[in-house]
C-alpha cells in the first residue's frame, strides 16, 4: 500500500473515531426535557369520558381546548387550566395537563380523555395516583 493511500485510510479512520466520540458524548449529556415531579402523590378516583359525538359541532372546554378522541388530558374542577400533572395507574406514569374544568361525575376527582385512558389502560372508574409537575 502506498504512503498516500495509507495516509488517506488513517485520516478516514480518525474521522470515524471523532464522529463516534462526539455522538457518545452528546448522548451522555442528554437530559430529559420533562418537568420534574413535585410534591407527594395523591390518590383520586378517575374515569374516561367521551367527547362530543363525531359530526356534532365540537365545543371548546372551559380551558379553551377542543377535546377529540386523540386528545390527552384530564378534567378537574379544582385545578387551574393548563397545570401539568403526572398521573399514575398500575405503575405507568404519564405527564398530562388539565384541559377541562367542566362537569365531573359525582364521586370522581378526574375525568380522563379517551386517549389518556387508553395509554394508562383504564376502563371504568379506577383509583389513580397523581402529583404536580414543576
Image: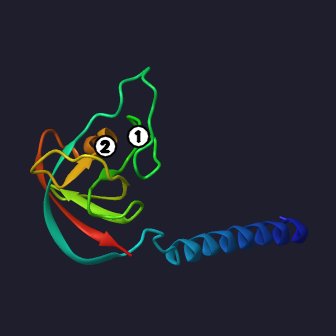
Which numbered circle lies on residue 52? none
111 shown above or below 7: above
Q: Is residue 114 left or right of residue 128?
A: right
Residue 91 point in image, percent of width and height: 18, 59
Q: How many marks?
A: 2
Residue 23 point in image, percent of width and height: 60, 70
Q: Residues within 10 Å of mark 2 (few under 14, many from 20)?
A: many
Which numbered circle lies on residue 67? 1
Quadrant of the rendered image containing residue 127: bottom left
Q: Residue at x 36, y 30 (%)?
A: 52
Q: Is residue 59 left or right of residue 16?
A: left
Which secondary structure lies at badge 2?
Answer: loop
Q: Earlier in the sequence, mark 2 or mark 1?
A: 1
In which quadrant is the N terminus drawn? bottom right
Q: Is residue 4 left or right of residue 73?
A: right
Quadrant of the rendered image containing residue 13: bottom right
Q: Observer-nearest residue: 25 or 124?
A: 124
Q: Is residue 39 left or right of residue 28?
A: left
> Do the residues under discs 2 and 1 have CB atoms within 8 angstroms?
yes
Quadrant of the rendered image containing residue 128: bottom left
Q: Residue at x 30, y 38 (%)?
A: 114
Residue 51 point in image, percent of width and height: 34, 34
56 shown above or below 116: above
In which quadrant is the C terminus drawn? bottom left
Q: Residue at x 33, y 41 (%)?
A: 115
Measure the C-alpha gap from mark 2 to mark 1.
8 Å
Residue 30 point in image, percent of width and height: 51, 73
Q: Residue at x 30, y 71 (%)?
A: 132
Q: Observer-nearest residue: 21 or 10?
A: 21
Which secondary structure lies at badge 1?
Answer: loop
Q: Residues within 10 Å of mark 1 (few under 14, many from 20)?
A: many
Q: Which residue is mark 2?
A: 113
Amino acid at each position: 500500500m502506498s504512503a498516500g493511500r495509507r495516509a488517506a485510510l488513517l485520516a478516514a479512520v480518525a474521522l470515524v473515531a471523532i464522529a463516534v466520540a462526539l455522538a457518545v458524548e452528546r448522548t451522555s449529556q442528554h437530559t430529559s426535557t420533562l418537568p420534574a415531579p413535585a410534591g407527594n402523590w395523591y390518590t383520586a378516583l378517575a374515569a374516561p369520558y367521551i367527547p362530543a359525538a363525531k359530526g356534532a359541532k365540537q365545543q371548546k372546554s372551559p380551558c379553551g381546548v377542543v377535546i377529540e378522541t386523540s386528545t390527552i388530558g384530564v378534567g378537574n374542577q379544582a385545578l387551574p387550566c393548563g397545570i401539568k400533572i403526572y398521573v399514575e395507574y398500575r405503575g405507568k406514569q404519564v405527564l398530562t395537563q388539565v384541559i377541562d374544568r367542566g362537569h365531573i361525575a359525582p364521586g370522581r376527582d378526574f375525568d380522563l380523555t379517551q386517549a389518556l385512558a387508553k395509554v394508562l389502560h383504564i376502563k371504568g372508574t379506577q383509583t389513580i395516583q397523581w402529583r404536580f409537575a414543576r
